[in-house]
Amino acid sequence: MFEGLSFLRELLTIRSYTGSEQAIGQRVVQEMQTLGFDHAYLDESGNAIGVVRGQKRGEALLLISHLDHVHEGDTTLWEHPPYDAVLEKNVLHGRGTVDIKGPLSAQLYALAGLIQRGERPVQDVVLAAFVEEETGGKGIAEFIARMPFKLPDGEILNITGAVVGEPSSNQVMLGHRGVSHVTLVFRGAAHHASFGLHDQNPMFELGEFLGRLRQYDLPVHPIVGEHTLAPTQVTCDSGSENVTSNTVSLVLDWRSTSTPEEMRQILKRLTSGLRVDYEVSELWTLKNTPGFHIEPDHPLVQKLYRHVREVHEAFGIWNFATDGRYTHAQGIPTVGFGPGNPRLAHTVHEHILLEELEQHVRVLQAFLLDPQ
């Protein structure tokens, strides 16, 4: 049985929407203090920080999770109430089981298990549960901006690696693509629909673009895979069914490793000859954040993989974005590893297997004790 089950079930009853993480942050810190962490506190951003000192002092591994979760949506669509933490045949149901209170609890109790056995990880470990991950990563961005990491007594720990605990079914994850949102505004001239002036109707400009997009071969990255460019929202400025629009706006969700300039060149080819305006934001804005990737032969990956390969022989990548992009940008080698099925994140079917939580604890403990 997963030792942290009671704690996890309690966390699931605490609604911690983005921007409202104080109560859960305080509870996480309380648990760290009770279980004997060397340091446990809320930092100035509201991030829950726990530190377990290692056999060797000074260099630290960062375990990354977060405190916030998305809204539950229509509760009538859930098989079990989303905040009742229903346990059924070793399956725990509810909002946050996978993203990310389950992984957070597994990380916390992996460290607590070592403390209870009188063992210490090889190096110092910092467990950080960040605020506002779901809306872009404000918590980790502020954490990184305050680097180097300092303990409350002023001692500096050099963070030399990071493990992102987002759900991966306990598979080693090598990263994910960046995410950008671009709005294209197709221009025409509004007129009475009865005239059928196709050359003035921006809907046909939109249609031509979508046809080109469907046939376009986007780049493929050797680690994080195929880029995607998906239309998600269409709006127009016409308020009547019998009037065409002056403009039609299309929102694109773009998952890639391309630079802003490379993205502009792709859009230039896709929109050639069309009456359209658009703007690609620079990186590290709300509209454009990069991804991250790490080579499979990196020592951090190989060390973790030694303990994971009996569970998963292959490496994976995430489709969604994580806080790992911030540590990677800081030059910190970053890899992913977390319990829970990533396809269940943000869904009304969210649940986690206790077996996966137990498995994560065992593997993470072995990794943290590995001297190589």
Image (cartoon, helix red, strand yellow):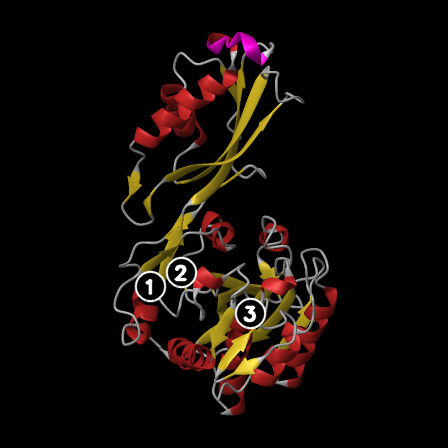
Tell whether label 1 touches label 2 (CB within 8 Å): yes
Q: Is residue 270 part of the magenta span, yes or no?
A: no
Q: Quadrant of residue 151?
A: bottom right
3 or 1: tag closer to the N-terminus: 3
Q: From the viewer's perspective, is 185 left or right of 33?
A: left
**Horizontal and vertical percent for residue 9?**
61, 79
Image position of 255 with respect to 268: above or below: below
The amino acid at mark 2 is Val
Image position of 163 with respect to 364: above or below: above
Residue lying at 43% horizontally and 24% vertically, measured from the top left: 264
In the rendered image, which residue does mark 2 sit on? 335
**Horizontal and vertical percent for residue 320?**
46, 52
Range drawn in magenta: 193-198
The amino acid at mark 1 is Val
2 or 3: tag closer to the N-terminus: 3
Tag count: 3
Q: Is residue 194 part of the magenta span, yes or no?
A: yes
Mark 1 crowdedness (10 Å alpha carbons): few <14, some 14-19, many ≥20: many
Task: Quote the CA–CA distance across marks 2 and 1.
Answer: 7 Å
Q: Which is nearer the eye, 171 or 333? A: 171
Mark 3 crowdedness (10 Å alpha carbons): few <14, some 14-19, many ≥20: many
Q: Which mark is residue 231?
A: none
Of helix, strand and loop, which one carries label 1? helix
Q: From the viewer's perspective, is 268 left or right of 35?
A: left
Q: Which is nearer the eye, 71 or 29? A: 71
Q: Which is nearer the eye, 265 or 89? A: 89
Q: Which mark is residue 127?
A: 3
